[in-house]
């Protein structure tokens, strides 16, 4: 059972180095971590910008395709209409031919047969005319759809240009900031003790953060308790002490203690009474087994 966050919500308090003299390397590493975090945030942002532009360009391509599709539908409509008109002309020619033949037929049967052909051709014409009317109504809708698609494409094109410009500006700004951070980073790194720096790099690589505040005798990153003697040493901020559990470099922030002074006092009084309670030692990282 973990005894973490027992005193209400944890609020991150900026380390106030003015209250205590801090080990120079510890102070530099604190600063270095801030720089490294900001640099990785900026690097991620720079990497993400082309993806965002690609996504909006894909959307633009969709709109272009929609316009092409609407145009193709209109072309199809017009082609069908032309075909219908040609068909009507063909049937009208047939009717004229049948009528001229009818004047020279010899029998009633032949005449009826021709009139039957005329009737059939007239029905075909009527069908074509219905279809043409349908196509005309359809064309109106298709033209409206094309206008909408073209308007959307226009807006989208403008948005893409705006986004691209913004991405370019943001990238340039980020890269400038990154260059500044790199300079600061190099300066700090060159002044930190080699083994402390190597430890910092190792933990940073594995855990994405290399330092953690120690509060109420606990590492605030992994919430494992530190030994009482180590705790006293951490509180001075005079040396580099690492968490036995997660490896992070621990620092003490007096401001956090001041903020939680009242409840902490009560807790300490309770803790003193139950010093050997199992829940206190369960998460202890010292080799007690
Ligand atoms: Zn830890």
Image (cartoon, helix red, strand yellow):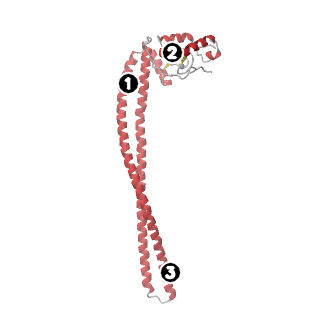
At numbered mark 2, what does the secondary structure look like: helix, strand or loop? helix
From this viewpoint, is residue 129 visible? yes
- How far apart are labels 2 and 3 at the CA level? 107 Å
268 or 35, nearer to the observer: 268
Which of the two discs, 2 and 1, labels the residue nearer the N terminus? 1
Which of the two discs, 3 and 1, labels the residue nearer the N terminus? 3
Q: Residue 16 occupies which quadrant of the picture?
A: top left
At numbered mark 3, what does the secondary structure look like: helix, strand or loop? helix
Mark 3 burial class by Cα count in 10 Å: few <14, some 14-19, many 20+: few
Residue 43, image x and y in percent? Answer: 41, 30
Q: Which residue is mark 2?
A: 257
- How far apart are labels 3 and 1 at the CA level? 93 Å
Q: Which residue is mark 3?
A: 116
Quadrant the C terminus occupies: top right
* Image depth: mark 2 or mark 3 in front: 2
Where does ligand 1 appear, by image quarter?
top right
At numbered mark 1, what does the secondary structure look like: helix, strand or loop? helix
* Image depth: mark 2 or mark 1 in front: 2
Mark 2 burial class by Cα count in 10 Å: few <14, some 14-19, many 20+: some
Residue 70, image x and y in percent? Answer: 42, 56
Q: Residue at x 44, y 85 (%)?
A: 101
Q: Which residue is mark 1?
A: 181
């Amino acid at each position: 059972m973990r005894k973490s966050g027992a005193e209400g919500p944890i609020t991150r308090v900026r380390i106030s180095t003015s209250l205590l003299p801090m080990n120079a390397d510890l102070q530099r590493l604190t600063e270095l971590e801030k720089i490294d975090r900001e640099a990785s945030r900026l690097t991620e942002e720079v990497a993400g910008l082309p993806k965002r532009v690609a996504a909006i360009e894909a959307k633009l391509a969709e709109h272009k395709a929609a316009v092409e599709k609407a145009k193709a539908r209109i072309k199809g409509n017009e082609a069908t209409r032309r075909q219908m008109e040609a068909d009507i002309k063909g049937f009208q020619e047939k009717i004229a031919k049948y009528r001229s033949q009818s004047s020279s037929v010899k029998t009633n049967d032949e005449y009826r047969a021709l009139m039957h052909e005329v009737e059939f051709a007239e029905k075909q014409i009527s069908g074509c005319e219905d279809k043409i009317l349908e196509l005309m109504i359809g064309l109106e809708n298709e033209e409206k759809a094309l206008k909408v698609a073209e308007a959307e494409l226009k807006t989208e094109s403008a948005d893409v240009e705006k986004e691209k410009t913004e991405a370019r500006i943001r990238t340039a700004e980020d890269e400038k900031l990154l260059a500044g951070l790199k300079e600061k980073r190099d300066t700090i790194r060159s002044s930190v003790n080699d083994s402390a720096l190597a430890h910092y790099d190792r933990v940073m690589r594995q855990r994405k953060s290399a330092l953690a505040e120690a509060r109420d005798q606990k590492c605030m990153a992994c919430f494992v308790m530190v030994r009482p003697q180590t705790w006293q040493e951490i509180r001075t901020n005079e040396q580099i002490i690492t968490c036995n559990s997660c490896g992070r470099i621990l620092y003490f922030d007096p401001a956090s203690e001041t903020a939680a002074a009242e409840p902490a006092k009560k807790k300490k009084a309770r803790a003193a009474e139950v010093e050997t309670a199992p829940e206190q030692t369960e998460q202890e990282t010292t080799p007690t087994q």
